[in-house]
């Protein structure tokens, strides 16, 4: 099965290239712990976590994992992300480096907190 045909996040991870699977599993564990229960799905062919809208997505590429926490999060953590390639709303995490676990926890918590605050308004 290719990742494009996965219907669950575990299927997506298992269908990814072996080089990607370790990083995908680690990031999935982090996000699953922080995101609300029942908020995960496959959309647009990639894993997505929801809470009043998209919290974050992630996807596997040949040399890196792309984690998309949104533009506000990427801007907020700009200094901490200086060693990583970033786009408008995404962070590239190369498979050749260990995942920055603590930073990813902070970013995911920042996103979840922002979504909870928006819900309370």
Image (cartoon, helix red, strand yellow):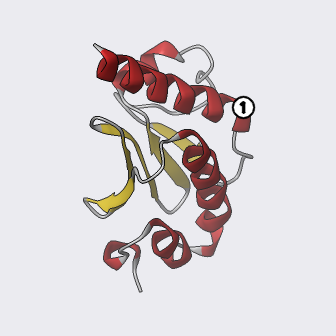
Q: Which residue is found at the position 63% from the left and 74% from the top?
A: 18
Quadrant, the C terminus? top left
Query: Could you say where residue 113 lies in the image, as x and y percent from the top left?
Result: 47, 22
Q: Position of residue 25 (x, y in %)?
A: 63, 60
Tell me: residue 72, above or below residue 11: above
User: Which residue is at the far front?
Assistant: 120
Q: In this picture, is 109 found above or below 31? A: above
Q: Nearer the viewer, residue 43 or 23?
A: 43
What residue appears at the point 45 percent right and 23 percent down from the top-left corner?
74
Residue toward you, 90 or 107:
107
At mark 1, the secondary structure is helix
- Disc 1 target residue: 102
Q: Is residue 20 left or right of residue 62?
A: right
| Residue under the point 46% across and 31% down | 86
Location of residue 18 with respect to 55 vertically, above or below: below
**Residue farthest toward the bottom in the current orientation of the protein:** 1
The percent position of residue 73, horizontal first and vertical second, equals 44, 22
Q: Mark 1, residues whose alpha carbon is within 10 Å: few (<14), some, or many (≥20)?
A: few
State the image coordinates of residue 9 (x, y, percent, origin top left).
Answer: 46, 66
Figure check: 97 above or below 51: below
Q: How many marks?
A: 1
Viewer-side residue, 53 vs 26: 53
Quadrant containing the N terminus is bottom left
Residue found 58% across the figure and 24% down from its top? 81
Please identify the quarter of the rendering in which residue 40 is found: bottom left
State the image quarter where residue 34 is shown: top right
Q: Nearer the viewer, residue 9 or 77?
A: 9
Identify the image quadrant of residue 111.
top left
């Amino acid at each position: 099965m290719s990742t494009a045909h996965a219907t669950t996040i575990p299927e997506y991870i298992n269908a990814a290239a072996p080089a990607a699977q370790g990083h995908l599993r680690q990031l999935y564990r982090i996000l699953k712990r922080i995101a609300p229960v029942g908020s995960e799905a496959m959309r647009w062919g990639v894993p997505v976590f929801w809470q009043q809208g998209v919290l974050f997505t992630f996807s596997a590429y040949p040399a890196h994992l792309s984690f998309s926490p949104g533009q506000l999060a990427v801007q907020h953590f700009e200094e901490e992300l200086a060693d990583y390639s970033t786009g408008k709303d995404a962070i590239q995490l190369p498979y050749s480096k260990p995942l920055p676990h603590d930073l990813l926890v902070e970013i995911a918590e920042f996103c979840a907190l922002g979504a909870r605050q928006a819900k309370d308004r």
